[in-house]
Image: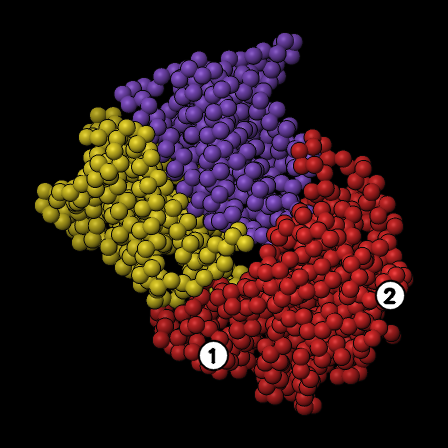
Amino acid sequence: MRGSADVEEKNQNGRYDGAEDGIVLRLTGITKRFGPLVANDAISFDLKRGEVVALLGENGAGKTTLMNILFGHYVADEGSVEAFGKALPPGDPRAALDAGIGMVHQHFTLAENMTVLENIALGTQAMWRARLDRGAAARRIRKLSGDFGLAIDPGAVVAALSVGERQRVEILKALYRDARILILDEPTAVLTPAETEALFRTLKLLVAQGLSIIFISHKLHEVMAASDRVLVLRAGHLVGERRTAETSRSELAALMVGQEIAPATVAPAKAGPPLLELANVSTRAGGGGAALDEVSLTLRGGEITGLAGVSGNGQAALAALIAGTMQPLGGDIAIGSATVKEWSPRRALASGIARIPEDRHAVGTIGDMSVTENVISERYRSARFSRLGFLDWRAARGFAEEIIADYDVKCPSPEARIRLLSGGNMQKLILGRALDPEPSVILANQPTRGLDVGAVSYVHKKLLEARARGAAILLISEDLEEILALSDRILVMSKGRLSTPSARGERTVRELGELMAGHAEAGA
Amino acid sequence: MEQALEILFTASFWVAAIRIASPLIFATMGELICERAGVLNLGIEGIMTAGAFAGWFTVYAGGDLWTGVLVAALAGAMFGLLHATLTVPLGLSQHVVGIGVTLLASSLTYFIYRLALPEVTSPPKIAPFEALAIPGLSSIPIIGPALFNQTPLTYLAFATVAIVAWVLYRTPLGLAIRAAGENPAAVEAQGISVTGIRMGAVMVGSALMAVGGAFLTMSAFNSFFFQMINGRGWICIALVVFGSWRPGKALLGAILFAAFDAYQVRLQQLSGGVVPYQVFLMMPYVLSILALVLVARRATYPKALMIPYQKGER
Amino acid sequence: MRLEPKPTPPLGVTLLFPVAAIAATLVITSLLVLAAGASPFSVFYLVARGAAGTQFAALETLTRATPLIFTGLAVAVAFRAKLWNIGAEAQLYIGGVVTIVLGTGALPLPSFLLIPVIMLAAMAAGALLLLGPAVLKTRFGVDEVVTTLLLNFIVLLFVSMLLEGPLKDPMGLGWPQSQRVVAEAQLPRIIQGKRLHYGFVIALCAAAIVWVIMKKTVLGYEMRAVGHNAEAASFAGIPVNRVLMKTALLSGGLAALAGFSEVSGLKGNLTLDLSPGYGYSGIVVAMLAMLNPLGVVASAIFVAGIFVGADAMSRTAGVPSYIADVMVATALLTMVTAILMSRYRMRWR
């Protein structure tokens, strides 16, 4: 990652804070508030030509918000953005594009019904032209993809592309517009380790051409591997700036988290009886990911089973299966020792399975209903909350107040629409709803995604408490560190299949990465 | 039985089918544009009513026929603007707003009609578009009169299909419209305003719907009646689904549907009153529902259809 | 411009939104009145007087409100669960058909038995009519808006067929109308000699019952959950499709009661002009009431008042009575905008 960046820096006598010349982008005092939440608090920094700057921070630290302001999706409450010496008008993605800023979003912004070429050419030719010049566009795409190792067929329909290929399309979109500054938002979240390496090679080629890159990540090893300089964001503040060569993972970790994180002390597991068993279960594809292909899995009481994997490899289908929203096409589900015949969310709940869904806004809660109405949604038919078809609102409200108190939820009242709560408080309510009936099996799907540090450790604490009580827990997470910290057993999912389990500490991170990339286990 | 088959080989049957298809083609193209951009426009029935009146009344008041078509289109675009303002930047329910626009457009039309012509019992007539034979082509048997001896508005309907298809698939604008209905974030990320594209699409689409309505008063008939749209707008919505949101297929659907409609009228005459005439009149509606049921499962909706978009949302 | 959710305002403030919507409607429609060469103040005054100025006017408004309460409730129930029933008009007519089939002497029962039997049968017919589109929606993914709309046309033709065929009144001088219902099948008048009938009382009871269902029962909770977020409801174990079926049955049944009440309480027989669009006006009634069943009563009376008042006004002021339809449609659009304002605040940056 050195190369031309070094040349630049030598020209500037190694100074990167004062030299005006090499500076391509300058953010000054950016502040953005969402209601009471300050997502960005007076953030200022510069980006130089041919430099890779990593924007490091926990989920929810404000990285994406900052980049969305830079790109014009949001308008900052205060502060200004300057690109190549000229102020960018706020709230205008077009102006950002014209100024040479390209952004690769975490969730790709591609129209799946259109071809690669159409997606790339969208908005690059005069809108009122009578004819889209496909030939010229195709030539340019081929040239760019050859130059930067981004192999892709311009005529392919996006719906048929893999995740890695889609990311290449996104990068090509920016390069096609002559982007000089490229922003990559969590680019590796959806990639296998091998694809990640290919991406880093491409980034090197880009920097060699004089592009500047902002690379958003919360993964320390990637930041160390790919950047020249690191900016650390925490809770909306810029808390540190280091040259990558002069810092260490532990220093960055401390900056990022703000306090010494005592890794949750985990007592050794006392594995109990099997509480949920899947035997050769197959499903259809679900949640935009792979289908399950004859998956067998045993969850035992008193044990956290961690499921690692690159997203889209069947985790969504497995979660939907256990949650009861997806039917198995083949194979058996057994709860305790009884094989399940019919399967539905209601059966899953009745069998003692608690579910913490991946998307708490769209699936876990009903935004326009009250806190009270949301906490009873899984059990409103029980004798506690209803009789003869009539709901007992007093009991329901009491239950809501109980959870608000027990789980330390900050909300105006049990009657408030749940949409108005922060993500962390929403997740606490979901936890309370799920854990209150003392479930025997807990499905926790990305339970800490997007939460602040305090909420994350709270969720971890609650999961460990449930484990101590003897519950069997399946933890699905894209955050390998979370999996490593909490799991008694680790499984890796790839292309709809599960690896053999490994005990805590048995496999190295590298070995897990190989499995995530879909490389078969040695001897398996 | 033979007679029933012979109908299919008469020129007058196909002439009628193409005439019946013409307003449907306009309105179906209009709805298709809206839906391709991600907006379901249930204002269609009312907008067609408004267009039927606006075109006819312009001519009645002394304007020429093409001015009438233009006024109808403008009236449609205005209701489109109302619909789009409420559903695009404000993100209100496209179902409720669409019904509201239909109610408003038709009641406003009737109000203005009564205001302008308070005393009339039977609506005045205008001199409508006349058939314009295309030399040579119009003398081909059956196809000639059906396709090449129609009014200029029918030719315009067919031209509209070609233009819509070209714009959607061959121009930069069309890319933006299709992308807005599939993934609006993709449009915004490329520096194009989703709001602008969607509002524009709804306005243009509504203008086409209104021209479809005007066809009825200015080409098919020569006068304006209450309830004259009679569910044609709703049928066009079914035709868009039936045509899988593709202009060519939707055109085919409209012609097929119109042929069936023309056929049932002739069958009705043949049946000699044994079967109640209402059964025949029901058929277009029943057929629309059946068509929906047949294709709905396989239909690939524009993914962002009916989903409002806020800037910066992903 | 962005929309940001804001806390639900207190009830007092919430009630201001319909008021604001109606005010906006009056401002907008006064432009049309001006275009008609009349003074908006005198026209609106004449509408108000025509709607409630005399005992006769007030009773007429309540009479006209009766079918609107039923169709408004039908729409409110369906829209709550996001089942877009635009077919209340068809369900109303089917209710009327059943009333004629059973009420013209086919069942020799005393009034206190015959009327409930007819009511239940009418509800069942309306419910089944909406069940079709609901099944097509859940099974085949066919949008129910289009199917219910198309069914309106089909059912009206079906009724026309019946009125010229099996249900035709032999003494009707060739008009497409049915026989009159027998005395036992008639809903009595509330005040002797006036048109207001017990259908109004039944409508009030229906509103109260629907309110209880929506607020207090498991079914109402399920319907609201499905309407607000079907995916989350399904995840929580709420059987979404079954709830939609129940919603369809309830909604179709309520709309059919409008037809029953008009035939049995007011008209006495079935004709093709039984409803001047009560099914469509029900949508406005429901939205003005913000889908609240008790609010439906108030908004139905309001909408009926506009229609009755505008009829009276147009006779004296010369402004076409279609101004009522325009006002009602405008009120629908201003109301949905007002509801949005009550839940979101607009930020221009």
In the image, what residue occupies the spot 14% across and 47% down? Answer: C189
Residue A123 falls in which quadrant of the image? Answer: top right
Nearer-N-terminus badge (1/2): 2
Task: Say which mark, if any, is on residue A13.
Answer: 2
Q: On the image, numbered disc 1 is attached to which residue?
A: A403
Of C118 and B220, nearer the camera is: B220
Seen at 13% across and 42% down, the residue is C54
Of residues C262 and A202, the one nearer the viewer is: A202
Residue A189 lies, with reference to residue C181, above or below; the image says below
| Residue beneath the point at 60% across and 59% down | A76
Q: Amino acid at mark 2?
A: Asn
Q: Which chain is purple?
A: B
Give me the disc on residue B185.
none
Q: Which chain is indicated by disc 1?
A: A
* Chain letter, yellow in picture: C
Q: Quadrant of the N terminus of chain A?
A: bottom right
Q: Gap in Å between the C-alphas at discs 1 and 2?
A: 59 Å
- Quadrant including the C terminus of chain A: bottom right
The answer to whether dots 1 and 2 both sit on one chain is yes
Residue type indicated by callout 1: Ile
Which color was chain A given? red
- Colour scheme shown: by chain
Does dot 2 land on a helix, a strand or a loop? loop
Residue A151 vs residue C221, the one in the foreground: A151
The 10 Å Cα crowd at callout 2, few under 14, some 14 to 19, many 20 or more, is few
Q: Is residue A195 visible?
A: no
**What SS does tag 1 mark?**
helix
In this rendering, is residue B254 above or below A382? above
Tell me which chain the residue with mark 2 is part of.
Answer: A
